[in-house]
Amino acid sequence: MPLYYEAYGLRWLSQIPMPELQRATLTAETQQDVADVQIESFDLAGLWEKWDVGSDNFVARDGCLFFRIEDTGLFFMEHGKRIVVSQVSGADPKKVRLFILGTCMSVIMMQRGILPLHGSAVVIDGWAYAFVGHSGAGKSTLSAALASRGYPLLTDDVVALTWDAGGRAIVSPGYPQQKLWQPSLEGFGMKQQDYATVHAEITKYAIPVQHYFHERAVPLGGIYELVPEPDQESGSVYLQEVSGLERLHLLCSHTFRGGLVNRQGLAQWLFETASRLSASVEINRISRTGHHFTAFEMVDRIINHIRKGVQIEI
């Protein structure tokens, strides 16, 4: 039986159980036509052959994107309304869901005009603050450190940005799970045997965060780019404002699965959306040197920076 879920400001009706997601709360009056996106399971082998994509594992045509992951499955996203999954026999279900929750949902967001940034976000004093960066930059570690200080998690891995009626950027909640690498678990004094891996091939762990998950959309207060500098030995944290055209480049470079933007003919949309966002929020860069666990020092710097900054106009 298909199940309704909520994530990234959308309702998802899925034939595939998605235990990571929040179940949608429905009433008798909202049972009809409430799904924004459907997730279906169907044999796509024939369609993949018909598309005749050759050696390319990703292809986009007519508002649709189709991709293949070896030993995992085929994934088809259509017009921002449908995800179809054809799972390879014997594939790890966790890995299949990882691609649905990441690449597939991000492509759906792009197709619907929602900007997916590669990052995490927490709520501080009623505003969402996003932490973006490349893989391994420490986004989830920083948001976990903030959450431990009482600042609720809004989303991990993908930050979904839209606009409210007043033109403010809004961050929608993702789902109540964080993914932390083993060194981060150790930094927080957590035991790896207490958590399941995201999937069997990597030592990244799924951490349930229902008790400190924020379930409502929040206006965006600012963006911080995380830039680790492990070759520097001082073990310090530095914060600086990003200005000018560098802001636009930063937002484009940290769009989740940004390489799929051009394939879908969405380059102009990304430029316009990133330009609008660049002009509306403060963007800063925070770097940490050395290999020390500096998450809590970064928390102190960020909180002090936010609270000493200019009051955000509502």
Image (spheres, rainbow, N blue to C red):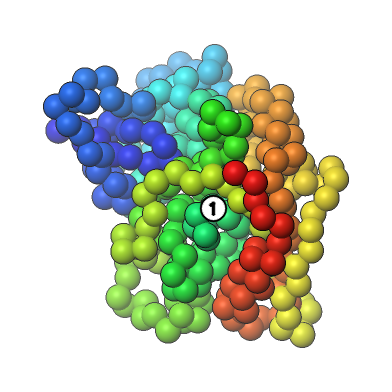
User: In percent of the image, x 72 and y 52: which residue is there?
Assistant: 283
| Image coordinates for residue 271, horizontal then vertical, percent | 73, 31
User: Which is more toward the observer, 142 or 2?
Assistant: 142
Left/right placement of residue 63 relative to residue 30 reads right
Whether residue 107 is visible here, answered yes or no, is no
Q: Is residue 146 left or right of residue 7?
A: right
Residue at (37%, 77%) from the top-left corner?
A: 192
Q: Residue at x 64, y 66 (%)?
A: 307
Q: Nearer the viewer, residue 82 or 33?
A: 33
Asked whether residue 30 appears in the rendered view, the answer is yes
Q: Position of residue 254 (x, y in %)?
A: 66, 47
Residue positioned 69% across, 46% down in the render: 281
Q: Is residue 75 above or below residue 294?
A: above
Residue behind mark 1: 127
Element carrying mark 1: strand
Give the class, few, some or many, for how many residues have Cα within 10 Å of label 1's Cα (few <14, many ≥20): some
Q: Name the one closer to the observer, 33 or 257.
A: 33
- Quadrant of the image containing the C terminus: top right
Q: Quadrant of residue 266?
A: top right
Q: Say above or below: 9 vs 31.
A: below
Quadrant of residue 238 within the rendered picture:
bottom right
